């Protein structure tokens, strides 16, 4: 899959290239790694546009189909298959994980807040250890003016998720 040189790749092109790879069931994780290695330098691999495009494409790849208006059916096995890709690029870095959460927020807004989809992704990311409690808490409490679109609806829809996350963290601290 050809792309323009990475120093000329715009966020839209990056997103398009990642969609082509990740929405293709036959593309292996190694093909994703190879494309990223060939087209992006280390700094670009840690950049917000890349991390957001990656998270968005991985999430989109898990949609089986959209049924009955805003209801989405999701395939957790696709997410599980793409787990190594997320693990590689989220890299246990809170700021990188925060970018992934901002991508989820933007995707939820773009999809007009389908019921349970955002919570499903957040629970899966937390259960898989791909997004830390620290990153979720930063996302929950940070009031970045550039990240306000849909924030209130997103946080309201995740109220129970954050309560459970906090309770689990407190229980771990008591051990």
Image: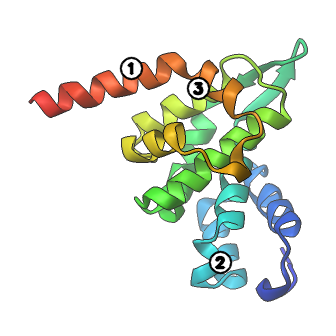
Q: Which picture quadrant has residue 46?
A: bottom right
Residue 71 position within the rendered picture, expressed as x and y whole percent measured from the top left = 80, 16
Q: Nearer the viewer, mark 3 or mark 1?
A: 1
- Left or right of residue 91, residue 139 in this image: right
Q: Which residue is mark 2?
A: 44
Drawn side of residue 38 relative to residue 17, left or right: left
Count of all numbered marks drawn on residues in the image: 3
**Residue 165 visible somewhere in the drawing:** yes
Local packing at callout 2 (Cα closer than 10 Å; few below 14, some 14-19, many 20+) is some
- Which circle marks residue 120 in the picture? 3
SS at mark 3 in the image = helix
> In the image, residue 51 lies at what x, y percent?
64, 61
Q: Residue 140: horizontal and vertical position, in percent?
A: 52, 36
**Residue projecting furthest to the top:** 68
Within 10 Å of disc 3 (Cα), the crowding (few <14, some 14-19, many 20+) is some
Q: Residue at x 77, y 24 (%)?
A: 113
* SS of the residue under disc 2: helix
Q: Is residue 3 above or below residue 86?
A: below
Image quadrant where one finds the N terminus: bottom right
Looking at the picture, the colour scheme in use is rainbow
In space, the residues marked 3 and 1 are separated at their CA atoms by: 14 Å
Which residue bears the numbered disc 1?
164
Among numbered discs 1 and 2, the one appearing first in the sequence: 2
Question: Which residue is farthest right?
Answer: 69
Q: Earlier in the sequence, mark 3 or mark 1?
A: 3
């Amino acid at each position: 899959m050809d792309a323009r040189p990475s120093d000329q790749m715009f966020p839209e092109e990056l997103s398009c290239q990642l969609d082509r790879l990740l929405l293709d069931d036959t593309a292996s994780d190694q093909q994703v790694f190879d494309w990223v290695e060939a087209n992006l330098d280390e700094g670009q691999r840690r950049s917000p546009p890349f991390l957001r495009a990656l998270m968005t494409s991985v999430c989109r790849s898990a949609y089986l189909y959209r049924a009955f208006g805003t209801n989405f059916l999701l395939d957790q096995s696709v997410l599980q298959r793409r787990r190594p890709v997320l693990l590689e690029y989220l890299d246990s870095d809170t700021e990188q994980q925060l970018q992934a959460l901002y991508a989820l927020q933007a995707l939820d807004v773009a999809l007009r807040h389908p019921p349970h989809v955002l919570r499903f992704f957040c629970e899966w990311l937390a259960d898989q250890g791909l997004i830390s409690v620290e990153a979720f808490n930063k996302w929950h409490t940070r009031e970045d003016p550039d990240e306000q679109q849909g924030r209130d609806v997103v946080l309201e829809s995740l109220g129970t998720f954050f309560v459970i996350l906090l309770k689990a963290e407190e229980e771990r601290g008591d051990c």
